[in-house]
Image: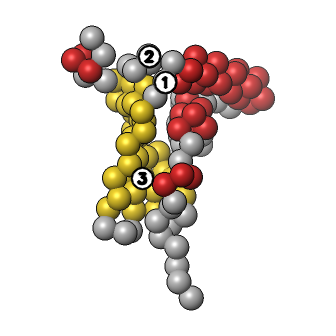
Amino acid sequence: MRVKTVLQTSHLTPKKEIKRVLRGANLSDDDPNKPKGWLEKTVAKANASIFTELATGLGYEVTKTHMYGFATLASARVPSAKMDFYWIGAFGKWTYITAREMEKEHYD
């Protein structure tokens, strides 16, 4: 039996993953920034959806680097939001790493 370790490159959907990050899905349950309760979660979902649709509607760039067959490092650059988002794909799933503000020379 062969174990699937690397995701197919088409499986990362940046819009969906950015929404997950912005609504706090990657935060631990005891993180004070994680939305709690129905209202907070609903507002976080709405804010994440609106921001993501507006920011990615003007375009984004996805870069993937395959790491010797065991993982894939992916980044999504969203110039209108001046942000770079990073994930690592291994063992059949994508895991969010971090988001950073773009360096000024990349958007001026």
Disc 3 on helix, strand or loop? strand
Q: Amino acid at mark 1?
A: Gly
Q: Residue furthest bottom?
A: 1
Image quarter where the C terminus lies is top left
Horizontal relation, residue 81 to residue 11: left or right = left
Q: Amino acid at mark 3?
A: Ile
Residue 41 x %, y %: 70, 29
Q: Residues within 10 Å of mark 3 (few under 14, many from 20)?
A: many
Tell me the residue at 51%/60% (across/down).
8
Q: Earlier in the sequence, mark 1 or mark 3?
A: 1
Disc 1 on helix, strand or loop? loop
Query: Is disc 3 in contact with disc 2, using a CB cutoff of under 8 Å?
Result: no
Residue 30 x %, y %: 56, 40
Tell me the residue at 74%/30% (across/down).
37
Residue under circle 1? 59
Horizontal relation, residue 46 to residue 2: left or right = right
Nearest to viewer (mark 1 / mark 3): 1
Query: Is disc 2 in contact with disc 1, using a CB cutoff of under 8 Å?
Result: yes
Residue under circle 3? 88
Residue under circle 2? 80
Nearest to viewer (mark 2 / mark 1): 1
Residue 42 vs 2, above or below: the answer is above
